[in-house]
Image: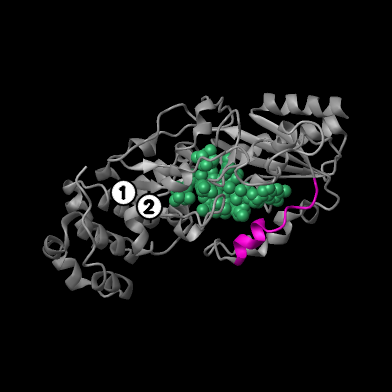
Amino acid sequence: MREARERLRRALTALGFDEVRFAAVAPAPAGGLRAWLAAGYQADMHWLERTADRRLAPELVLPGARTVIALGVNYFDGAPAPAAPRPVWARYAAYSDYHDALRPALARAGALLEEICGVGPGDYRWCVDTGPVVERGWAARAGLGFAGKNAMLISRRHGNWLFLAAILTRAPIEPDGPLGAQTGGPGAPRGPAPDSVGLLCGTCTRCLDACPTQAFPRPGVVDSRRCISYQTIENRGVIPRPLRAGIGTRVYGCDVCLEVCPWNRFARAGRRTLLAARGEAAALSWEELLAMTPERFAAVFRATPVKRLKLAGLLRNACVAAGNSGEQTLLGPLARLAEHGAPLVRVHAVWAVRRLAGAARAEGLLRAARAAETDPLVLEEYAAGAAEPTAPAP
Ligand code: B12
Ligand code: SF4
Ligand code: SF4
């Protein structure tokens, strides 16, 4: 069996997966996901509640499941962290959508599992991100890395720059074991239990200190409602006013708690054979972003994760980021967006003009738009926020 496991590991590595580890299906640690949901940290991602039982118990997703194969794909390109005053995108947005990109490789991985472990096509199920599996938890169990205080699954080889995927299977494959168990020597592991958050963080707290919106109620736990990643990707509505300044010039997602992690110094640029680089977004200037049309949006973001945001969502984010940029030249484009067809865009354009110009100057710039406004959401924005502090010049 061990020989088959190593053959499978080699075959999946050759397929393009940078980490291939095995965990035995076993009870999940108490607390974790359930405590997180009970605290409301999922914001409006109600699908996480509906699927909680299955997320924690692979045997409910695939009856008779014995093993979780935890897979990681390194998407680090070796470039330094992007910085303001340019629009900043999460690193993963520089690729075509990883859900679609990894699917063919996962189908091929299933065929290899059949060939090497002798199971049938109904004896496994693979998922990437959207499946009902706590991917980081099972990856930690399999020793692919450890759960950092930044909540990321951190690999000693690749830092936190890994996409994760999982294959649940009825094949009984010998598990690799979590990191704590391996490093603790024979017998019971010394120090923190293998499932514990921050296993290899020591006294470091960089990620917790760096989060611009204080989204960590405690180490390893993210309150999505305060997280920039949630607000700029998952939230379809208005971004809460108190969080907007903290978003800085981030247009899509957030990597702050990832970038600061010292474990990344061991990370090398990934092979990325399963991913297709898409540099168009990062090359967009503020002016191009704020003047984005439906046609251009479709062309630039086709097959990327950003397309799910839709044009109004992207313009919403671009307004907030531009408002924080300190670039006075953006006042013209932002004032035009205060007359955009979508109320969602107008709300954030009004905020951005005020933040850049200050309340007194903004009044003149927004006079025509305000006179024509009838939408209650936008009128509420006009009524509030007059005291918003202006963004510093870059
Ligand atoms: C919902 C979600 C979000 C939410 C909530 C994030 C959060 N911290 O929970 C939001 C929208 C905020 C988000 C943001 C991001 N996300 Co996200 N997200 C998910 C999703 C779909 C579910 C996560 C979840 O269940 N959260 C609930 C909490 C309680 O669980 P957890 O932190 O994932 O897991 C912990 C517990 O389960 C427990 N645990 C410990 N041991 C064990 C053992 C077992 C057996 C079990 C079951 C559990 C367990 O500790 C785990 C680790 O801390 C996963 C994909 C998936 N299917 O798992 C991707 C995922 C976690 N996201 C990912 C990424 C890349 C991001 C961002 C970096 C994107 C960006 N650049 O903007 C940020 C990072 C924010 C952060 N610091 O966490 C990657 C993470 C890869 C990695 N190396 O860790 C994943 C795995 C997607 C993927 N397939 O690659 N995300
Ligand atoms: S992704 Fe950004 S906002 Fe979210 S927890 Fe990390 S640093 Fe904070
Ligand atoms: S930044 Fe420090 S505390 Fe945060 S995950 Fe990395 S090592 Fe752990």
Give the labeled residue for mark 1: 292
How many residues crowd mark 1 within 10 Å: few (<14), some (14–19), many (20+)? some
Task: Specify whether residue 37 is painted magenta.
Answer: yes
Say which amino acid is labelled 1: Met
Q: Position of residue 149 (x, y in %)?
A: 55, 45
One can see residue 134 in this view: no
Q: Given the image, on which type of amino acid does mark 2 rest?
A: Leu
* 2 on left or right of 265: right
The answer to whether marks 2 and 1 mark residues whose Cβ atoms lie closer than 8 Å is yes
| Residue of label 2 | 314
Residue at 58 percent across and 43 percent down: it is 148
Answer left or right for 325 relative to 260.
left
Q: Where is residue 150 drawn, in percent x and y?
A: 53, 45
Does residue 78 lie above or below 169 as drawn?
Answer: above
Task: Residue at 68% x, 24% y: name it.
Answer: 14
How far across and how far down the image is residue 35, in percent? 64, 62
Going from N to C along the chain, the mark reached first, 2 or 1, is 1
Determine whether 335 is above or below 77 in the image: below
- Magenta-colored span: 25-38
